C-alpha cells in the first residue's frame, strides 16, 4: 500500500481520461528531460511554456517570451503564499511587455492561459 498506488496513479489516470498528456517516467532511471524539464528541481516546463506563449500571443518576439518566463519564474518574495499569489495573478490576468513590435501597440497584455480557445493550452501532468 503506497501513496503512488492509491493517490498518484488514480489521479493521473483521471487526468488522462479527460484529455491531459500524462508523463509517466520509468523508474529507477528517471530523466528530467523526459518531463520537459532540465532538472527535477524545475517547477515550470520552460520549453512547453515558451511554445504556448508563442501560440497564444502571436505578436511576441523571442526576447519578450524569455522576459515573460523570467518574470513568471522569478520569486521575489520569501513567503510561499506571497509567491503563489503573485504567480496566480500573472496566470489569470497576464502581464504586459513594452510593445507589440508588429503593430507598435504599447504595453500589450501577454496571456499565459488562453481562456477563449482552450485548445491553445497544454494540459500536462
Image (cartoon, rainbow, N blue to C red):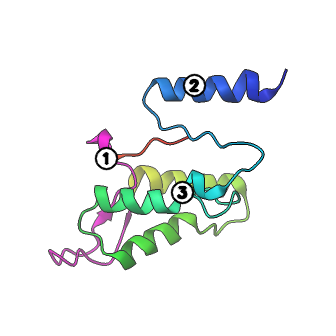
Viewer-closest of 12 and 78: 12
Q: Which residue is mark 3?
A: 45
Residue 81 vs residue 105: left or right? right
**Upstream in sequence: badge 1 or badge 3:** 3
Viewer-closest of 47 and 81: 47
Q: Residues within 10 Å of mark 3 (few under 14, many from 20)?
A: some
Residue 7 vs residue 64: left or right? right
Asked if 73 appears above or below 27 in the picture, the reply is: below
**Upstream in sequence: badge 2 or badge 1:** 2
Give the image location of residue 2, x and y in percent: 83, 25
Task: Describe the element under mark 1 as helix, strand or loop.
Answer: helix
Q: Residues within 10 Å of mark 2 (few under 14, many from 20)?
A: few
Q: Which residue is mark 2?
A: 13
Mark-to-mark CA distance, 2 and 1: 22 Å
Residue 60 position by quadrant: bottom left
- The quarter of the picture where the C terminus appears is top right
The residue segment tinted magenta is 95-120
Q: Residue at x 26, y 42 (%)?
A: 117
Task: Describe the element under mark 3 as helix, strand or loop.
Answer: loop
Q: Residue at x 14, y 74 (%)?
A: 103
Viewer-closest of 52 and 37: 37
Q: Residue at x 62, y 26 (%)?
A: 11
Q: Which residue is mark 1?
A: 120
Residue 75 position by quadrant: bottom right
Amino acid at each position: 500500500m503506497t501513496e503512488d498506488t492509491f493517490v498518484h496513479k488514480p489521479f493521473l489516470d483521471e487526468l488522462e481520461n479527460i484529455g491531459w498528456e500524462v508523463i509517466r517516467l520509468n523508474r529507477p532511471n528517471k530523466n528530467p528531460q523526459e518531463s520537459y524539464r532540465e532538472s527535477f528541481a524545475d517547477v515550470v516546463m520552460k520549453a512547453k511554456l515558451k511554445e504556448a506563449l508563442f501560440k497564444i500571443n502571436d505578436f511576441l518576439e523571442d526576447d519578450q517570451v524569455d522576459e515573460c518566463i523570467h518574470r513568471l519564474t522569478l520569486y521575489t518574495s520569501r513567503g510561499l503564499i506571497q509567491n503563489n499569489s503573485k504567480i496566480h495573478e500573472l496566470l489569470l490576468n497576464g502581464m504586459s511587455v513594452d510593445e507589440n513590435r508588429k503593430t507598435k501597440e504599447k504595453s500589450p497584455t501577454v496571456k499565459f492561459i488562453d481562456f477563449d480557445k482552450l485548445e491553445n493550452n497544454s494540459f500536462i501532468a
